[in-house]
Image: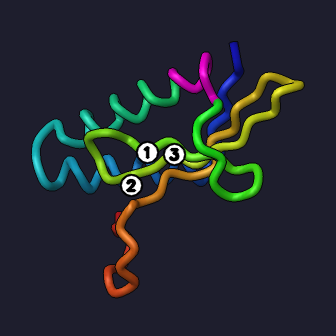
């Protein structure tokens, strides 16, 4: 079993995304957080998803257009969640503001 460490950046991103979804529809932010937390829980037992950027691995969410970016330290049995990013790549759209 792996220990999960969520970096502050990722925590802030999750809060920002949840607040955005909550502003769109009541309880949608909660649904996002629940799905995110379920996926992070999965990383405790199976963290070997797609290696995307050198040592950074990715795990896309199913119901929301976001991807969890994380690293795995196999020796120490630690998964570090680095970021949660949008799958949309339109540079003309600004990031969600709090």
Q: Which of marks 3 and 2 precedes in the sequence?
A: 2
Residue 49 falls left or right of residue 76: left
- Dividing the picture into quadrants, the one containing residue 72 is top right
- Which residue lies under the disc numbered 1? 60
Q: CA distance from mark 2 to mark 3?
A: 14 Å
Label 3 close to label 1 by CB (< 8 Å): yes
Residue 20's x, y, as percent?
A: 26, 56
**Residue 77 higher or lower than 1, as above or below:** below
- Which residue lies under the disc numbered 2? 16
In the picture, the quarter occupied by the N terminus is: top right
Q: Which of label 1 and label 2 is nearer to you?
A: 1
Magenta region's main secondary structure?
helix
Q: Which of marks 2 and 1 precedes in the sequence?
A: 2
Q: Which residues make up the magenta segment? A: 42-47
Circle 2 — which element? helix
Which residue shows up at 75% across the image and 56% down it?
Answer: 54
Residue furthest out toward the bottom: 92
Q: Is residue 84 one of those drawn in magenta?
A: no
- Which residue lies under the disc numbered 3? 68
């Amino acid at each position: 079993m792996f220990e999960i460490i969520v970096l502050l950046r990722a925590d802030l991103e999750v809060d920002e995304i949840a607040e955005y979804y909550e502003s769109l529809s009541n309880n949608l932010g909660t649904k996002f957080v629940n799905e995110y937390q379920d996926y992070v829980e999965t990383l405790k037992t199976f963290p070997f998803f797609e290696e995307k950027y050198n040592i950074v691995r990715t795990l896309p969410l199913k119901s929301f257009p976001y991807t969890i970016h994380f690293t795995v330290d196999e020796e120490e049995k630690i998964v570090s969640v680095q970021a949660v990013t949008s799958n949309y790549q339109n540079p003309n759209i600004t990031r969600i503001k709090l």
